[in-house]
Image (spheres, rainbow, N blue to C red):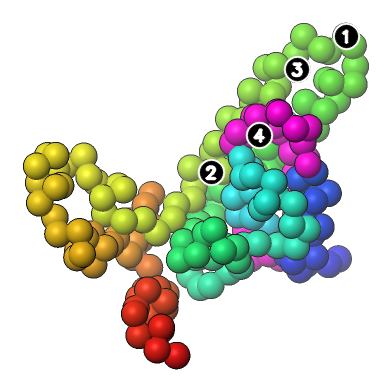
Amino acid sequence: MDTKATDIVWTDYFPRIKKGLDDGKFKNLRHPVPLTPDYPTNVQRVMEFVWRCGRNAEVTARPEAVIAPVRDMWFIADHEHYEGIYYHCCESVRMMMFYTRYQHYFEQYREARMKPEMLHHVQDMGDMCRQALWGVFNCTGQNAHFHERDMGQFSDTEWRDVPRTRADDILEFHSCSRCIMPMPKQIVLVNKLQRSKLQDVF
């Protein structure tokens, strides 16, 4: 069996929705991508799946994978609008548990939609699917900035007093926004080099 995460044609699972429809996170239930015998491949597939949910067509219209593994369960989105943002799988086993639950509920949901006598169950089954997907999502985080996660600890006056020219250096939070796991030093270094003005010299 093929075990490559990049062999999924993602437009098969994220086709364009009709114009005007709201594709908010988990509002439109997507057919789950298949899993493989390879655990790292499955984690990558699920990370890509949950990351694409609720994104605009510019992202979901790409048939190739957008999420790429870096190291230590950190992933990066290969997309210009998400430069410098890394995504973390905090609890891979729990995430996969919720995803397999979603696969199970989705089959029941799809079956209910095809049988008139089960239509009254469709809403409940859809809600169960969404709960499973939120479970998947809640096992992930991303690198954030201190002010995005903890700015509520500061008063408006204190926040205004932070020098704006130094704010990124002072407040940058090189950890997962959900589980506080520090990012690998190699990723932090790459991030800093990408932001450095020295790159303009080359």
- Nearer to the camera, 43 or 27: 27
Q: Earlier in the sequence, mark 4 or mark 3?
A: 4
135 drawn magenta: no
- Nearer to the camera, 26 or 117: 26
State which mark lies toward you, 4 or 2: 4
Q: Which residue is mark 1?
A: 117
Instruction: Please state, as top left, top right, bottom left or bottom right, where the C terminus lies in the image.
Output: bottom left
Within-10-Å neighbours for mark 4: few <14, some 14–19, many 20+: some
Distance between the Cα atoms at labels 1 and 3? 10 Å
Element at label 3:
helix
Q: Is residue 192 left or right of residue 127?
A: left
| Residues under numbered marks 3 and 2 in contact, where contact means CB atoms less than 8 Å apart | no
Within-10-Å neighbours for mark 3: few <14, some 14–19, many 20+: some
Element at label 1:
helix
Task: Give the x, y percent position of residue 87.
Answer: 49, 59
| Residues under numbered marks 4 and 3 in contact, where contact means CB atoms less than 8 Å apart | no
Q: Which residue is mark 4?
A: 23
Distance between the Cα atoms at labels 1 and 4? 28 Å
The answer to whether one can see residue 177 in this image is yes
| Residues under numbered marks 1 and 3 in contact, where contact means CB atoms less than 8 Å apart | no
Specify the farthest residue to the bottom.
202
Q: Write the start and end of the magenta stretch as one range.
A: 16-44
Does the magenta stretch mainly form a helix, a strand or a loop? loop
Element at label 2:
helix
State which mark lies toward you, 4 or 3: 4
Q: Residue at x 84, y 21 (%)?
A: 113
Distance between the Cα atoms at labels 4 and 2? 16 Å
Q: Type of residue at label 3?
A: Val
Q: Which residue is mark 3?
A: 122
